[in-house]
Image (tube, rainbow, N blue to C red):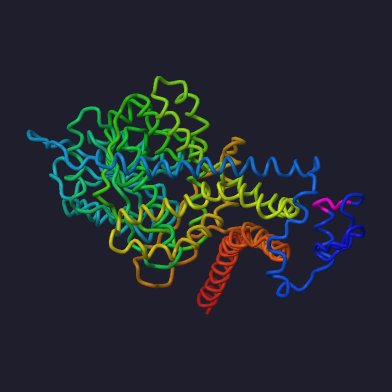
Amino acid sequence: MRCFDCGLTVLGVPARCEAERMTPLNTLFAWLLVQPSIGSRLMTGLFDDTFAGIYRLSTFDWALLIPYFGTLFVLSIYGVHRYETIRRYRKFKKNLPKDAPCFYESLPRVTIQLPLYNERFVVDRLLEGASRIDYPHHLLQIQVLDDSTDDTHPYTERLCNEYKAAGVRIEYRHRTNRRGYKAGALQEGLETATGELIAIFDADFVPPPDFLHRTVHFFTDPETGVVQTRWSYLNKEFNILTQVEAMLLDGHFVLEHGARCGSGLFFNFNGTAGVLRRSMIDDAGGWQHETLTEDSDLSYRAQLKGWRFVYLPMLDCPSELPVETYSFQVQQARWAKGLTQVAMKLLPRILKADLPLKVKIEAFMHLTPNISYPLMILVSMLVLPVMIVRFYMGVFQMVTIDLPLIIASFWSISAFYLYAQRELYPKSWWKSIAFLPMLMAAGVALTVSNSKGVIEALLGIKTSFARTAKYALGSQKVKVAPTAYRRRSGALPWIEIAIGAYFVLMVDFAIDTYNFFAIPFLVLFVCGYWWAGFSTLYQEYRDKLAWQRARKLAEA
């Protein structure tokens, strides 16, 4: 715009500096009407601070800037916590248990619980892995807790009968309802469980044969209530998404669990690939299903009762990662909602308990980080008008305000996940650097779905337990199994594509106003939202074609 009074040009639209000073909204409208050539102006005026000294922020400007920077400040707190987790891990990792005194007289009885719901494609692998676990036959019981409503039920029952005929102590339990979902199935399974210890494996896990021999001896300590092992991945190399998922989970299992366990803070049983003391479950109030993350719920109730949790990073249990974007979103949204529900249920009790302050602070940071997703939605809505306001503030002011927040919020993500990879793969961790942009884009791809889950939790809206489809896939590139096990995404991908288009508009505006510092972050949001939206639509289009082909073959 060219000022009628002083002749300065900003955005190519005439305006006045003082008498008719442009507001962010009408500046945006003017910019939309008159678009200059971007390429010819990329480097012109990069450090033009003409308005830095004469532009006075209005009440409307402050109404945009205060919530914007307030939200970024909250997000930066969780970013600083990542740095603190790295520091704590480095300091206390030497305290992580490596071995335990052995049961010399007799080993404890163990019940292995295998909760299932429509897991037709992985049940063979699961039962084979469980039946091969090395443990005295008379001390081991396997329970298959099947809530399936499809042909998984008769198929699994037949498999269990075959294993029983072969001498395996296996019990098949099928419920005609899903009361309490997984938590309900586990609790009802305890009615006939014979074990002092309960090992749990979800359908997508393959327990190693020596799993029990490497875990049960930690229960020689009568205060030990849970032994949790690290997850590893059968299909990490399947596609880019699975490699990103592996990095995300490695950060949790290596740094978060390692730092919390090593420093004596509360941490959670992950619902699978672990062993629990039966008496601890009863003492903590049993499996409860008010939340979608019954594992974290039980974990905090048990630790409030004084039970000790042990984490074994040296023992990994292979699992299968979701290979489709929407399946990944469904899984993460369930975890985000469930953890928020646990926070609402137990944080008041935790904060009132007679616990060290550091334990309370870490519990708060552990149970509440998903609030960052709706906050990111709020930031997304404010970015464009705030960019317009801050155009007049000058580059120096923008850098001095933004740089600390960027270091706290975004650099912490890179440092956190790269350090976890360095701990796991000291010789090849540097290869993970190439996946950092995809990792951040994946975080953006979760924003809408996880925000929905968090808001539902805050409003007390109950939803069913949404399972994540598993197909018994390894690292080989094969076609994904039939479509009957996939959930429909509804309007979600279209919303994500629309938000991505909004960020394209912001990228264009940032280029046109020489705000080059913001462009990489805005492009990241574009990639994240469009990756989620377009990949989901593509997968569902493929599913539709596959269904149509199958119907034609059936009619032929």
Image position, residue 25 (x, y; %): 81, 53
Rendered residue at 54%/72% (across/down)? 542
Closest to the observer, 424 or 171: 424
Q: Foreground: 385 or 370?
A: 385
Comparing 22 with 210, the one in front is 22
**Residue 87 at what x, y percent from top left?**
37, 42
Residue at the (57%, 38%) spot, across then down:
457
124 lies left or right of 243? left
Q: Quarter of the image holding residue 228?
A: top left
User: In the rendering, at what x and y percent does residue 404 appear?
Assistant: 55, 47
- Prevailing secondary structure of the magenta residues: loop
Chain part drawn in magenta: 21-25
Q: Is residue 120 left or right of residue 506?
A: left
Q: Is residue 170 above or below residue 362?
A: below
What is the quadrant of residue 472 in the picture? bottom left
In the image, residue 330 sits, relative to residue 284, either above or below, namely below
Quarter occupied by the N terminus: bottom right
Q: Is residue 405 magenta?
A: no
Viewed as shown, does residue 178 lie left or right of 527?
left
Please name the residue shown 51% across and 46% down the image.
Answer: 408
